[in-house]
Amino acid sequence: MPSSARLMPAALVVLLAGCTTASRPATRVSTPASTATGCDARIETGPLPDWADAGFSGDARVPHVFGVRGEIVAVLFGHPLTYGRADEPSNKILWVARPATASSGPEAPATLLITATLDGAGTRATREVAGGPGPSIIDLPGPGCWHLELRWSGRTDRMDLVYAGS
């Protein structure tokens, strides 16, 4: 075997080791979303924060996505989310909002309003979760990266979720 062929695996290990960062948590898992399209769907599998773990026992580790502002977390019971899913489990999402620091006025609706836009296509869909953040089944009209604008009780956040093709 030529000496250059023997050095190739070692060089590959060194190259790959240089591509990792110590600051990225080991529990963060990238989704199949393409960064070229601007999708930032980051599914975490570590423990939920204290403010979002009511009803879970011990050090529960479930797939979840944080809102960009950190005001809400989507706990993905139907992971991976899938377009056109005909069987169980469905696209179950538990929305948990960070406790509000100030009381919202009576004019602020409690319903969680989700406006989803398909990346690169402009397709839009609106979904509602009556009563505000809580359990839901959120099916969207196609596969791909969906940019979600979330509004509830006078509060807002946003996140990206990926729906795979069935």
Image: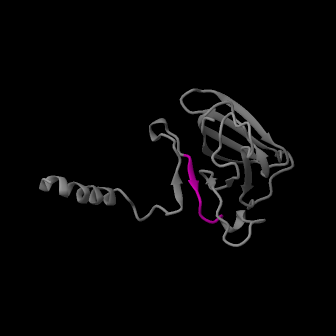
Q: Main secondary structure of the magenta part?
A: loop
Is 41 placed above or below 100 here? above
Q: Is residue 45 left or right of residue 127?
A: left
Residue 145 x/y as whole percent: 57, 38
| Magenta stretch holds residue 44 | yes
Is 140 included in the stretch rendered in magenta?
A: no
Question: Foreground: 21 or 99?
Answer: 21
Image quadrant in which the N terminus is located:
bottom left
Position of residue 115 measured from the top left corner of the image (x, y, whole percent): 69, 36
Foreground: 164 or 160? Answer: 164
Residue at 59 percent of width and 64 percent of height? 46
Q: How many marks?
A: 0
Q: Position of residue 149 (x, y in %)?
A: 66, 41
Position of residue 127 relative to residue 72, above or below, is above
What segment carries the magenta color? 41-48
Q: Is residue 153 visible?
A: no
Q: Position of residue 111 (x, y in %)?
A: 82, 44
Q: Residue furthest bottom?
A: 58
Q: Is residue 3 visible?
A: yes
In the image, 109 versus 72, the foreground residue is: 72
Left or right of 7, for residue 118: right
Q: Residue at x 63, y 33 (%)?
A: 117
Residue that protrudes farthest toward the left in the picture = 2
Name the residue at 76% across, 37% down: 127
